């Protein structure tokens, strides 16, 4: 099973991408933590702390679809190099501002938004680039799973390294580390041997290209059913991360260490999902995993909401993280398998919006609802909505499978 899970690494291009991107993602999370720490150290304002985070996330909701259009029209390899170079420049510029002592809060907010714009363009590119560097269809699910694995690993390792760097160095040093980390991706991409696929015509406008992508997503029944399910999880479940400090302080009477345990448990659960998905031998059966992931997320979140036992809450939040990533990566794998290559960028940009772009809106809504009814009731409502969504998806499974099967037959994944 282990050897089978590692089959994506037999492709040299994927190995280069995995190692380079892993270092880059760790650098990105180091910068995120350092930016948050610097804002709070300078102002002591929770509002400005939230504003800086929101500024970095909202561009994904607004601009990711345009990134998908570009991914379908131009050489993804060259575009990835451009976005990584821009991310490197942003990190180094932020480091220079902090090192000089001239940095102000508005600088951090503007730079956070700039990074959000870069990530809005970069995320659909990274997702659609994987099938180019892993051309074997049987290895694609493992590659997508390990793509998710390195993102979750970066989310776990990056903050830990950031904490150590902030103790012994400074925020400016963290920003420089992030800027330098992008060099690893650029070098990896330069060493790849990738034959660019034929792109769609560039004569139509970006808006027309976006409209074509939206029509395509609506016409393909699996996409039309799965993207709203991803948006539901992102809006209703992922805001638990925003409310975890309340549970750490109010429910468990703890501090930063308790919050760290909760975040670490969620991250550990998230890491288990791609490991399991990478070990699977075929793409068939992923619809059941989507259903199971949505249901697991909802039930575990409902139990966590009213738990007053720390050990139980740690288990529940780990399983919540597992459920979210199981559903997200299973949906991503299905979409990347069934879409036409000239629509891959636009389709995955819509997935990016549903997964990452909707999340800040959910966090804002969860914060407002928590002020009105309490954090416990807010998470319970979110979990209940996920359970309801799982029931709706269960009712739609026969239709979903009936529309996926002909595509799998055409691709040779299953025999007629």
Image (cartoon, rainbow, N blue to C red):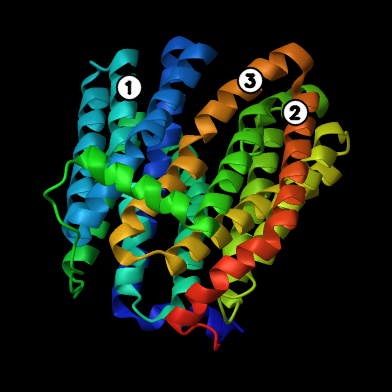
Q: Name the element at disc 3.
A: helix
The residue carrying pointer 2 sits among few (fewer than 14), some (14 to 19) or many (20 or more) residues within 10 Å by Cα, namely many
How many residues crowd around disc 1 within 10 Å: few (fewer than 14), some, or many (20 or more)? many
Q: Position of residue 195 (x, y in %)?
A: 18, 74
Q: Residue furthest bottom?
A: 415
Residue 87 at least partly seen: no
User: Which of the two discs, 1 and 3, labels the residue nearer the N terminus?
Assistant: 1
User: Could you tell me if residue 332 is visible in this image?
Assistant: yes
Q: Is residue 86 above or below residue 341?
A: above
Residue receiving disc 3 = 367
Pick the quarter of the image with the C terminus: bottom right
Q: Residue at x 45, y 54 (%)?
A: 219
Residue ID at (52%, 51%): 224
Q: CA distance from mark 1 to mark 3?
A: 23 Å
Which mark is drawn over residue 247?
2
Task: Write down the quadrant of residue 168 in the picture.
Answer: top left
Q: CA distance from mark 2 to mark 1?
A: 28 Å
The residue sitting at 39% across, 24% down in the picture is: 55
Which residue of the protein is positioned furthest toward the left in this rendering? 203
In the displayed structure, 104 sits above or below 93; it is above
Image x and y of residue 297, in percent: 72, 48
Query: Looking at the image, which residue is at 40% across and 64% down?
Result: 339
Task: Say which residue label 1 marks.
Answer: 108
Residue 73 falls left or right of residue 107: left
The picture places residue 262, in percent across and down from the top left corner, at 70, 40
Q: Which secondary structure lies at badge 2?
A: helix
Counting residues from the N terminus, which is met first, the one under dot 2 or under dot 3? 2
Q: Quadrant of residue 115?
A: top left
- For the residues carrying marks 2 and 3, which lies nearer the camera in this image? 3
């Amino acid at each position: 099973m282990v050897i089978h899970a590692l089959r994506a690494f037999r492709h040299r291009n994927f190995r280069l991408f995995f190692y380079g991107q892993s270092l880059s993602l760790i650098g990105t999370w180091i910068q995120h933590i350092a930016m948050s720490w610097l804002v709070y150290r300078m102002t002591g304002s929770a509002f400005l702390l939230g504003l800086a985070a929101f500024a970095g996330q909202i561009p994904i909701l607004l601009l990711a679809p345009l990134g998908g259009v570009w991914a379908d029209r131009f050489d993804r390899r060259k575009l990835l190099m451009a976005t990584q170079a821009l991310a490197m420049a942003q990190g180094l510029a932020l480091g220079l501002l902090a090192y000089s002592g001239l940095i102000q809060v508005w600088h951090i907010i503007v730079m956070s938004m700039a990074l959000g714009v870069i990530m809005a363009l970069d995320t659909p590119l990274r997702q659609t680039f994987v099938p180019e560097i892993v051309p074997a269809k049987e290895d694609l699910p493992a590659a997508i799973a390990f793509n998710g694995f390195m993102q979750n690993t970066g989310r776990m390792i990056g903050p830990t390294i950031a904490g150590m760097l902030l103790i012994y160095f400074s925020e400016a040093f963290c920003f420089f580390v992030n800027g330098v980390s992008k060099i690893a991706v650029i070098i990896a991409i330069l060493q790849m041997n990738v034959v660019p696929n034929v792109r769609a015509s560039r004569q139509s406008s970006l808006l027309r290209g976006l409209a074509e992508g939206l029509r395509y997503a609506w016409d393909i029944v699996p996409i039309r059913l799965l993207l709203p399910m991803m948006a539901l999880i992102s809006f209703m479940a992922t805001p638990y991360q925003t409310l975890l400090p309340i549970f750490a302080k109010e429910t468990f009477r703890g501090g930063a260490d308790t919050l760290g345990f909760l975040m670490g448990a969620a991250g550990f659960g998230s890491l288990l999902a791609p490991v399991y998905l990478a070990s699977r031998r075929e793409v068939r059966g992923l619809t059941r995993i989507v259903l199971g992931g949505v249901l697991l997320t909802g039930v575990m979140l409902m139990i966590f909401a009213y738990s007053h036992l720390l050990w139980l809450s740690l288990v529940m939040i780990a399983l919540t993280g597992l459920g979210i990533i199981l559903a997200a990566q299973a949906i991503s794998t299905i979409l990347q398998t069934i879409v036409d290559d000239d629509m891959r960028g636009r389709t995955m940009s819509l997935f990016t919006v549903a997964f990452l772009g909707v999340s800040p809106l959910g966090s804002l809504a969860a914060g407002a609802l928590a002020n009105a009814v309490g954090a416990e009731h807010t998470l319970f409502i979110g979990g209940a909505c996920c359970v309801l969504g799982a029931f709706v998806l269960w009712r739609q499974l026969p239709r979903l499978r009936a529309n996926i099967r002909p595509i799998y037959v055409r691709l040779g994944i299953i025999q007629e």
